[in-house]
Structures are given as C-alpha cells and as structure tokens.
Image (cartoon, rainbow, N blue to C red):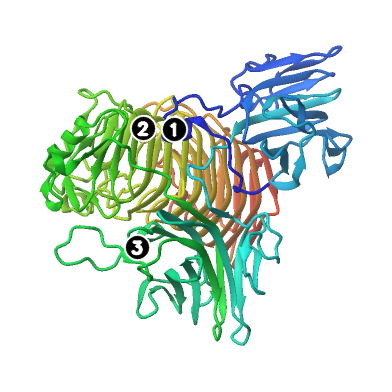
Amino acid sequence: MSKRSRRLAVWAAVVCTMAGLAPGTARAAAAGSGDFNDVAVGELPGGWSVSAGSGGTAAVVPVPDATNRSLQVSGGATATTTLAGLTGTVRAEMRVRGAGALTLAGDAGPAAGVVLRDGRLTDAATGALLTAVTADRWYALRAELDVTAQQWDLYVDGLRLLTGARFATASTALTALSVGDAGTFGIDDVLVREIPAPSVAYLVEDGFNDAPAGATPPGWFQASAGATVVATPSDADRSLRLTKSASAAAVSAIRRFPAQSGVLLVRANLRTDELTGTKVAMYLQNDSGAAAVSLQFVKDHLVLTDGKTSTQLLTLTAGEWYAVQLAVDVATHQFEIFVDGRRYAPAATAGSTVVPQWPLRDQTMTSISRLLFGVGDGQAGTVLVDNLLVYPSGSAIPAEVRDVRQFGAVPDGVTLNTVAIQRAIDDTPVGGAVLVSGGVFRTGTLRLKSDLTLWVARGATLLGSPDDNDYPLQDRGKLDFPDFGSSTWKALIYSVGAGNVHIDGGGTIDGNGTSAQWVGCDGTACPTVRPLLIAPMAGSNVSIRNVHVRNSAAWGIVPVQIDGLLIADVNLDSDIAYNRDGIDVVDSHHVLIERVSVLADDDAICFKSNTAAGVEHAVVRLSTVGRSSRANGLKLGTASFGAFRDGAMEDVLVKHVDKSAITVLATDGGVAWMPAFRRITIDGARRSHFVLLGRRTADRTNPPPPAWISGVRLEDITATHLVEPSIVTGQDTFRVYDVLVSNVRTAVPGGAAKVPAEPIEYDGRYPESSLWSATTYGVLPVYGHFFRHVGGLTVRATVVSPAAADARPETGLRDVS
C-alpha cells in the first residue's frame, strides 16, 4: 500500500475546516479502542460484546500486571467491538499473545485477519504462514487497510509481512473487530481509526517507499541510468538518487503533472553528498522544458539562478537533508523560496512595504507542468530527492470580503492599525473574510470571531507592534479562557470560544519579537508578559494554513482546547532566544499538522496537557523541524496533567536539536497512550529519543504520582550526528509499558574509556534528557540505548554505530521485561 498516494476518505473533524462540517463527527477511533487499564479485573470493557462458547469467557485480567491490564478471551468465546463504518484508509493497532484469531470485518463479511496457533502466525484468508510466534510473548500488530482499494498491509513488530493483500470479502466499510478462539488469547492497546485525509489534492505525491530499490520510480519521465530508488535514509523510508561520475553521461529524471496556471506549491527534501561541482537540485518547467525556477547545488551552496546571474541562498553541509518549498504564482510570474522554514527573499525595493518575491525566469510563461532533477554533462556527484509534493494552494478567499484599508488601515509599517483592523473583523458577515493586502500593517492585539477568515495576502505582512502597551493583558478573572499553564497572557491574534475560524492567504504574520523588551529574557526574567503570536482558544473547526509566521515574542502558534484543528503549509521561523516555542497544541482533539517547517529557539512541535481534556487523535506528518536551539524537536509534554492519546508523527525531518529529537513525558499524573513515531530522519541532536514516566515536583504543589505510558512506537528512525545515547525510563516502581523499537539506526560518538557508575533515578526536577549527563545524573553506562523500568520491550533490527571504540555496552536493560 502506498505511503500516502491514495486519496483518503474524509476525516470529518479535520476536513470540516474546509467543508464547514460540525466538529465531533469524525470516526477517529473504534468504541472498543483502549488500553483496558481503567477497567475492573473480571469485567468486560465498554464497547465490547461477547459470544461465549461452552465455558468460554472474555474479561479484563491483571496481565502483564495490575496496572497494565489486558483483555483475555478463552474457551471458544469471541469478543467483538463495533466499528462506526470506517472507510478510506484505516489503521488497526494492537498487541496480542497466545492462541486465537483476530478478524476485521466489513459490511459484507470478514475483510482481513490473522490466526495465532501452534507457533505460527498465518493469514486467516489464505492460511499462508507469515512468521513463527511464541505463545507467551506479546506481539505488536499493525494493519493498514485501504477500503477503497480493498487491500491491506500487515506489520508485526514493525516488520511488514503482507503488502497489498486482497480483502477476503469485498466491503464498503469496516464494521467490527473480533478476537477469540478455542485457546487463550490476550489483546491490549487496541486502536482502530480512520487516517485523516490530506487537506489538499496532490498532483504529485512521491515518497518512493513502495518503489523497488534499484529501479526507476513509477510515474517518472525520461529517467536515465543512474536515477534509481535507494534505501536512504532506510529501507522503509526510500528516496530517489541521481548519481554519476564526471566521465559518464548526464543523469536526469522528470516528473510531470497536469499544467497549472494558478498558485502552485512544491515541497521536497533535497540532499547532496558532495560539496563539489554543479548539480540540478530542482528545476520547475513548463511542457516545452522552459525553466520557471532553477535551483542548483553549486559547490557548498544552494543557488538560485536565472541563467545569467546566480544568488547564493544558504551554505550546505554534505549529506544533510534540506526541506525546500516553492510557492509559485504563475499568473503574476513571481515565487517565494523557503528552506527548513526560513524565507529567502530578494532585496527589497527602497521605500516599498510589500514583501519582495523572485521573478520567474520566463515572464511569458502561462503554465507549469513538470520538475527536473539531475547531474549534467561534465559534472559529478549525487542528488537525492524524497517526499516530493506538488499541489495547488488548496484555498480561496470567501466571496464576502472586508478590506482593512476601507476601514482606515494604512500599509506603511508605521501607522498603528489595531482599531481599523478590529473594526473590519467586527463588520465582516458570517462566512466572510478580512483582507490584509498590499503592504505592511502594524497592529496590536486582534480578536477573531466565529465564521471568519483572516486572509493575509501573498506579499502582505501583518506586523506586531513593538510597543508592549498595544497588547492588553488577558486575565482569567475577566475573560473566560481555558487553562494552558498561565492565568494571564497576551497575544497578537487570538480567539476565545469561536468556531469556523481560519487564517490563510500566503502572506506573513510577523510578531516583531526582536523588540528590546522581549529579547534576552525567558518567562520569569521578562519585565512584561510577552505576547503569543496566534492563540485560538476553546473553539472548534480552526485552520491556520498558507502563511509565513515569524519572530514571535513568545510561543508561536498556540491552539488551546480546539476540537478540529488543521495547521498546514506553514513556515514558522522564531529562532530568537529565549523560550520561543514553535507550535504548542494544548488539550486539543482531532488535530492534523502537515507540511509545516519550524525553526524555533525552544520546543519546535509540542503537545501539552494542562487539564483532563488532554490531547487526542493528533497527526503530524510530512513536516520539518529545522532547528530547536535549546530544546526538543517533536515532543509530548512537558505539561502532562491530562492524557496524550493516539498520536502519530510520521515522515518528519528533524535537524539541529539541542536536546532530544523525540520526547515523550508523563510527569504530572497524566498518561501517554499509543504515541507513534515512524519514518523520522534525525540529523544533529543530543539524543534521538527520550521517554520518561515520573513525578516532577517543581511547578505545582502536591502533584499526583506517576500513572503510565503505554504503546510507544519508535519505527524506521535514522539518526546521525547524535551526542549521547537514547533513554526510555520509568521512575522507581512506575513502569513504561509496551515499547517497540524497530529498525532504529543511530550514529553516536562513542569513545568512552570505561563504564561509568549507574545513573540516579529521576528526582522530580524539570524533565529534560540533558539531566542524564556528567554534571547531573551521570553519564549513561551504554553508548546506544538505555532502558529502565520498562514492561514489555521489543527491539528488532536496531543498529548503533559508534564513531570510536567504546568500553560501554551498546544497550542497557534495568528492570526490563
């Protein structure tokens, strides 16, 4: 099954951001999905029914232990949970053991299933042996089912054993999950849900993962010898490589797509492994091969050329992936370039307040229809391409428009326009748009209302005032807003209790966060409360897309208690010290973050929970963390008072992270259930991953004891330029459960001359992976992976490559089963 290539069914709570559907209508997970840990021993969990044979039973049991419980079916009983007619692409995950059958049924009969019996795992439909199994061992199963194509893939402990298997019975929807057999069958951490559809219709969507290694990828035109699919970064996360010697013939490959004459977005991860010669990084062309945009790797620079002059955009590092985005307006013959979230623009015209854009090479061009990559005659070297996406912008301004200039706003970058813009917002009818275009509009705090689009047009900037007095202090005693860790705050753009709120347009929202009173201070040392950049709160159906967000005075995008959230095609650049998080999603449900790039000082893409609402059904995919100067890349926590349930981060590039590229924390009494990280490429971090269950004591009085973390999935991760080994740990008697580490490949320094003493237990201070260092808890006694207080650990196909010989073992297990 293709990684993302098929059009998926509508995931209503996310796609409602464009269709105006009511939130809460998504079928995000099956009624019987769950961990069973809160179900009394001996009871049947809610959402499940049982059909018992003679003496058969189905009930929750204290297995593996009293905290981490599971559902056990035995004696010929069958336990069933009803699915809400799931369509499109459906993911079913669980862990199983014992002897029994597992069936996903459709509306016309069994669709997919497996049988565990007599040491064999077999396909229920064909009886074909998939792998040998051990009766008393837990196995992590994941089925990816394409209801439209009537086929499915099966993964066991992260290894794909079935690809494109046909449904046993043709079905238009999946309606039930059943488990049971004459033996004793255990099941735990059950999650069945629809995968959210892309927020745009892709013209090109090439991840290359299902193309055979060594072959030309399907759909490519004039791909010459030397243009092949390779297992880079890994076999599960492949890419297209074009390589040649100086004496060989030119190597190139062309990807065509339907001709486009509007606003076109192109994204790709690009890499070269040599800092010599000239190579075609990416050429955007029309049908006749005339170039609209030409990007080259020229020695150690990424260069934009028009055929006569060249502009160096950034300095390259050999072997490093770069996330490049082009935003092309064919009608105006202009385009923008972003790399890892940072915009590279031409010099501004004196006196102009419009964001400058690059001109297309051919100013007569009326359409664009193909991409070219390669290495030309007389040159030598390598170009790699991954996660190539081509698509129209996917949004349009509503018919009812209120132009802020009609309300007195002046786009000179100096005049304070708060009153004029707010008047435009208040005057806009239901379903209409507020238009910001044609210059730089300086403003203080703006409050958005329901059924509104804030449209910041391409070339325009909404600029935060540098005067702190232009941001009124929001106080919970006066304004009813949800808890996100602070009783007072400020913001440039916010909403409270609003639904159907959208920010769009292709323009720039600049927080002006380099102003003196907001620089060089963190949350406790600042003389004033620094304004957040964009903060929708206590609402539903919110989208933030097609904007460049930069220079936040504090955290960047901070949705709090939003049901139905889309953040897409956002380039966020707030790498300003201190405490500038990128995206912080707090206590929100049905979240889709895709095609974003973040450069941040602090945590880059972070989920937080300050209440019992927690975070549920969140997906981050096809995105990039370009930098986190002093914190983490992809993170759950630090605030973890509620639960993190069902989160997946997939196909993400994480670079230049000061602490951990992947972090999962449950240190405030909350739980983390089924957090999955798949196909993550890491280049430069202290650690690849850090998972901690514990009890911190610094922030709130009388914190509850630790709860649990269960279902951590770390699959197909490639990490280079790490500083220290990874950590997965509980605290004392509190354990992290059901951890799968599959095909994780890391490059570490090594070099330790002796094995150090055991590190101390987590003692409640602010939880960062950097605590396990020479100056705090002590250097870890391994060079690869350290596991402590873990119940149910599976490690497969995992390789650690130390740069220097190391006296420590690769892996350490302490209180691990």
Q: Which residue is mark 3?
A: 333
Report the mark closest to the observer, 2 or 3.
3
Image location (x, y in percent) of residue 422: 18, 35
Report the mark closest to the observer, 2 or 1.
1
Q: Which residue is mark 2?
A: 560
Rendered position, 308 above or below 517: below
What's the amino acid at mark 1?
Ala
**Residue name at image x 63 percent, y 84 percent:** 248
**Label pair 3/1, CB-CB below 8 angstroms:** no
Element under label 3? loop
Report the mark closest to the observer, 3 or 1.
3
The quadrant in which residue 473 appears is top left
Between the C-alphas of marks 2 and 1, the distance is 22 Å
Image location (x, y in percent) of residue 437: 23, 49
**Residue name at image x 75 percent, y 27 percent:** 186
**Residue name at image x 59 percent, y 33 percent:** 194
Image location (x, y in percent) of residue 245: 61, 83
Number of marks in picture: 3
The numbered mark, 2 or 3, whose residue comes first in the sequence reads 3
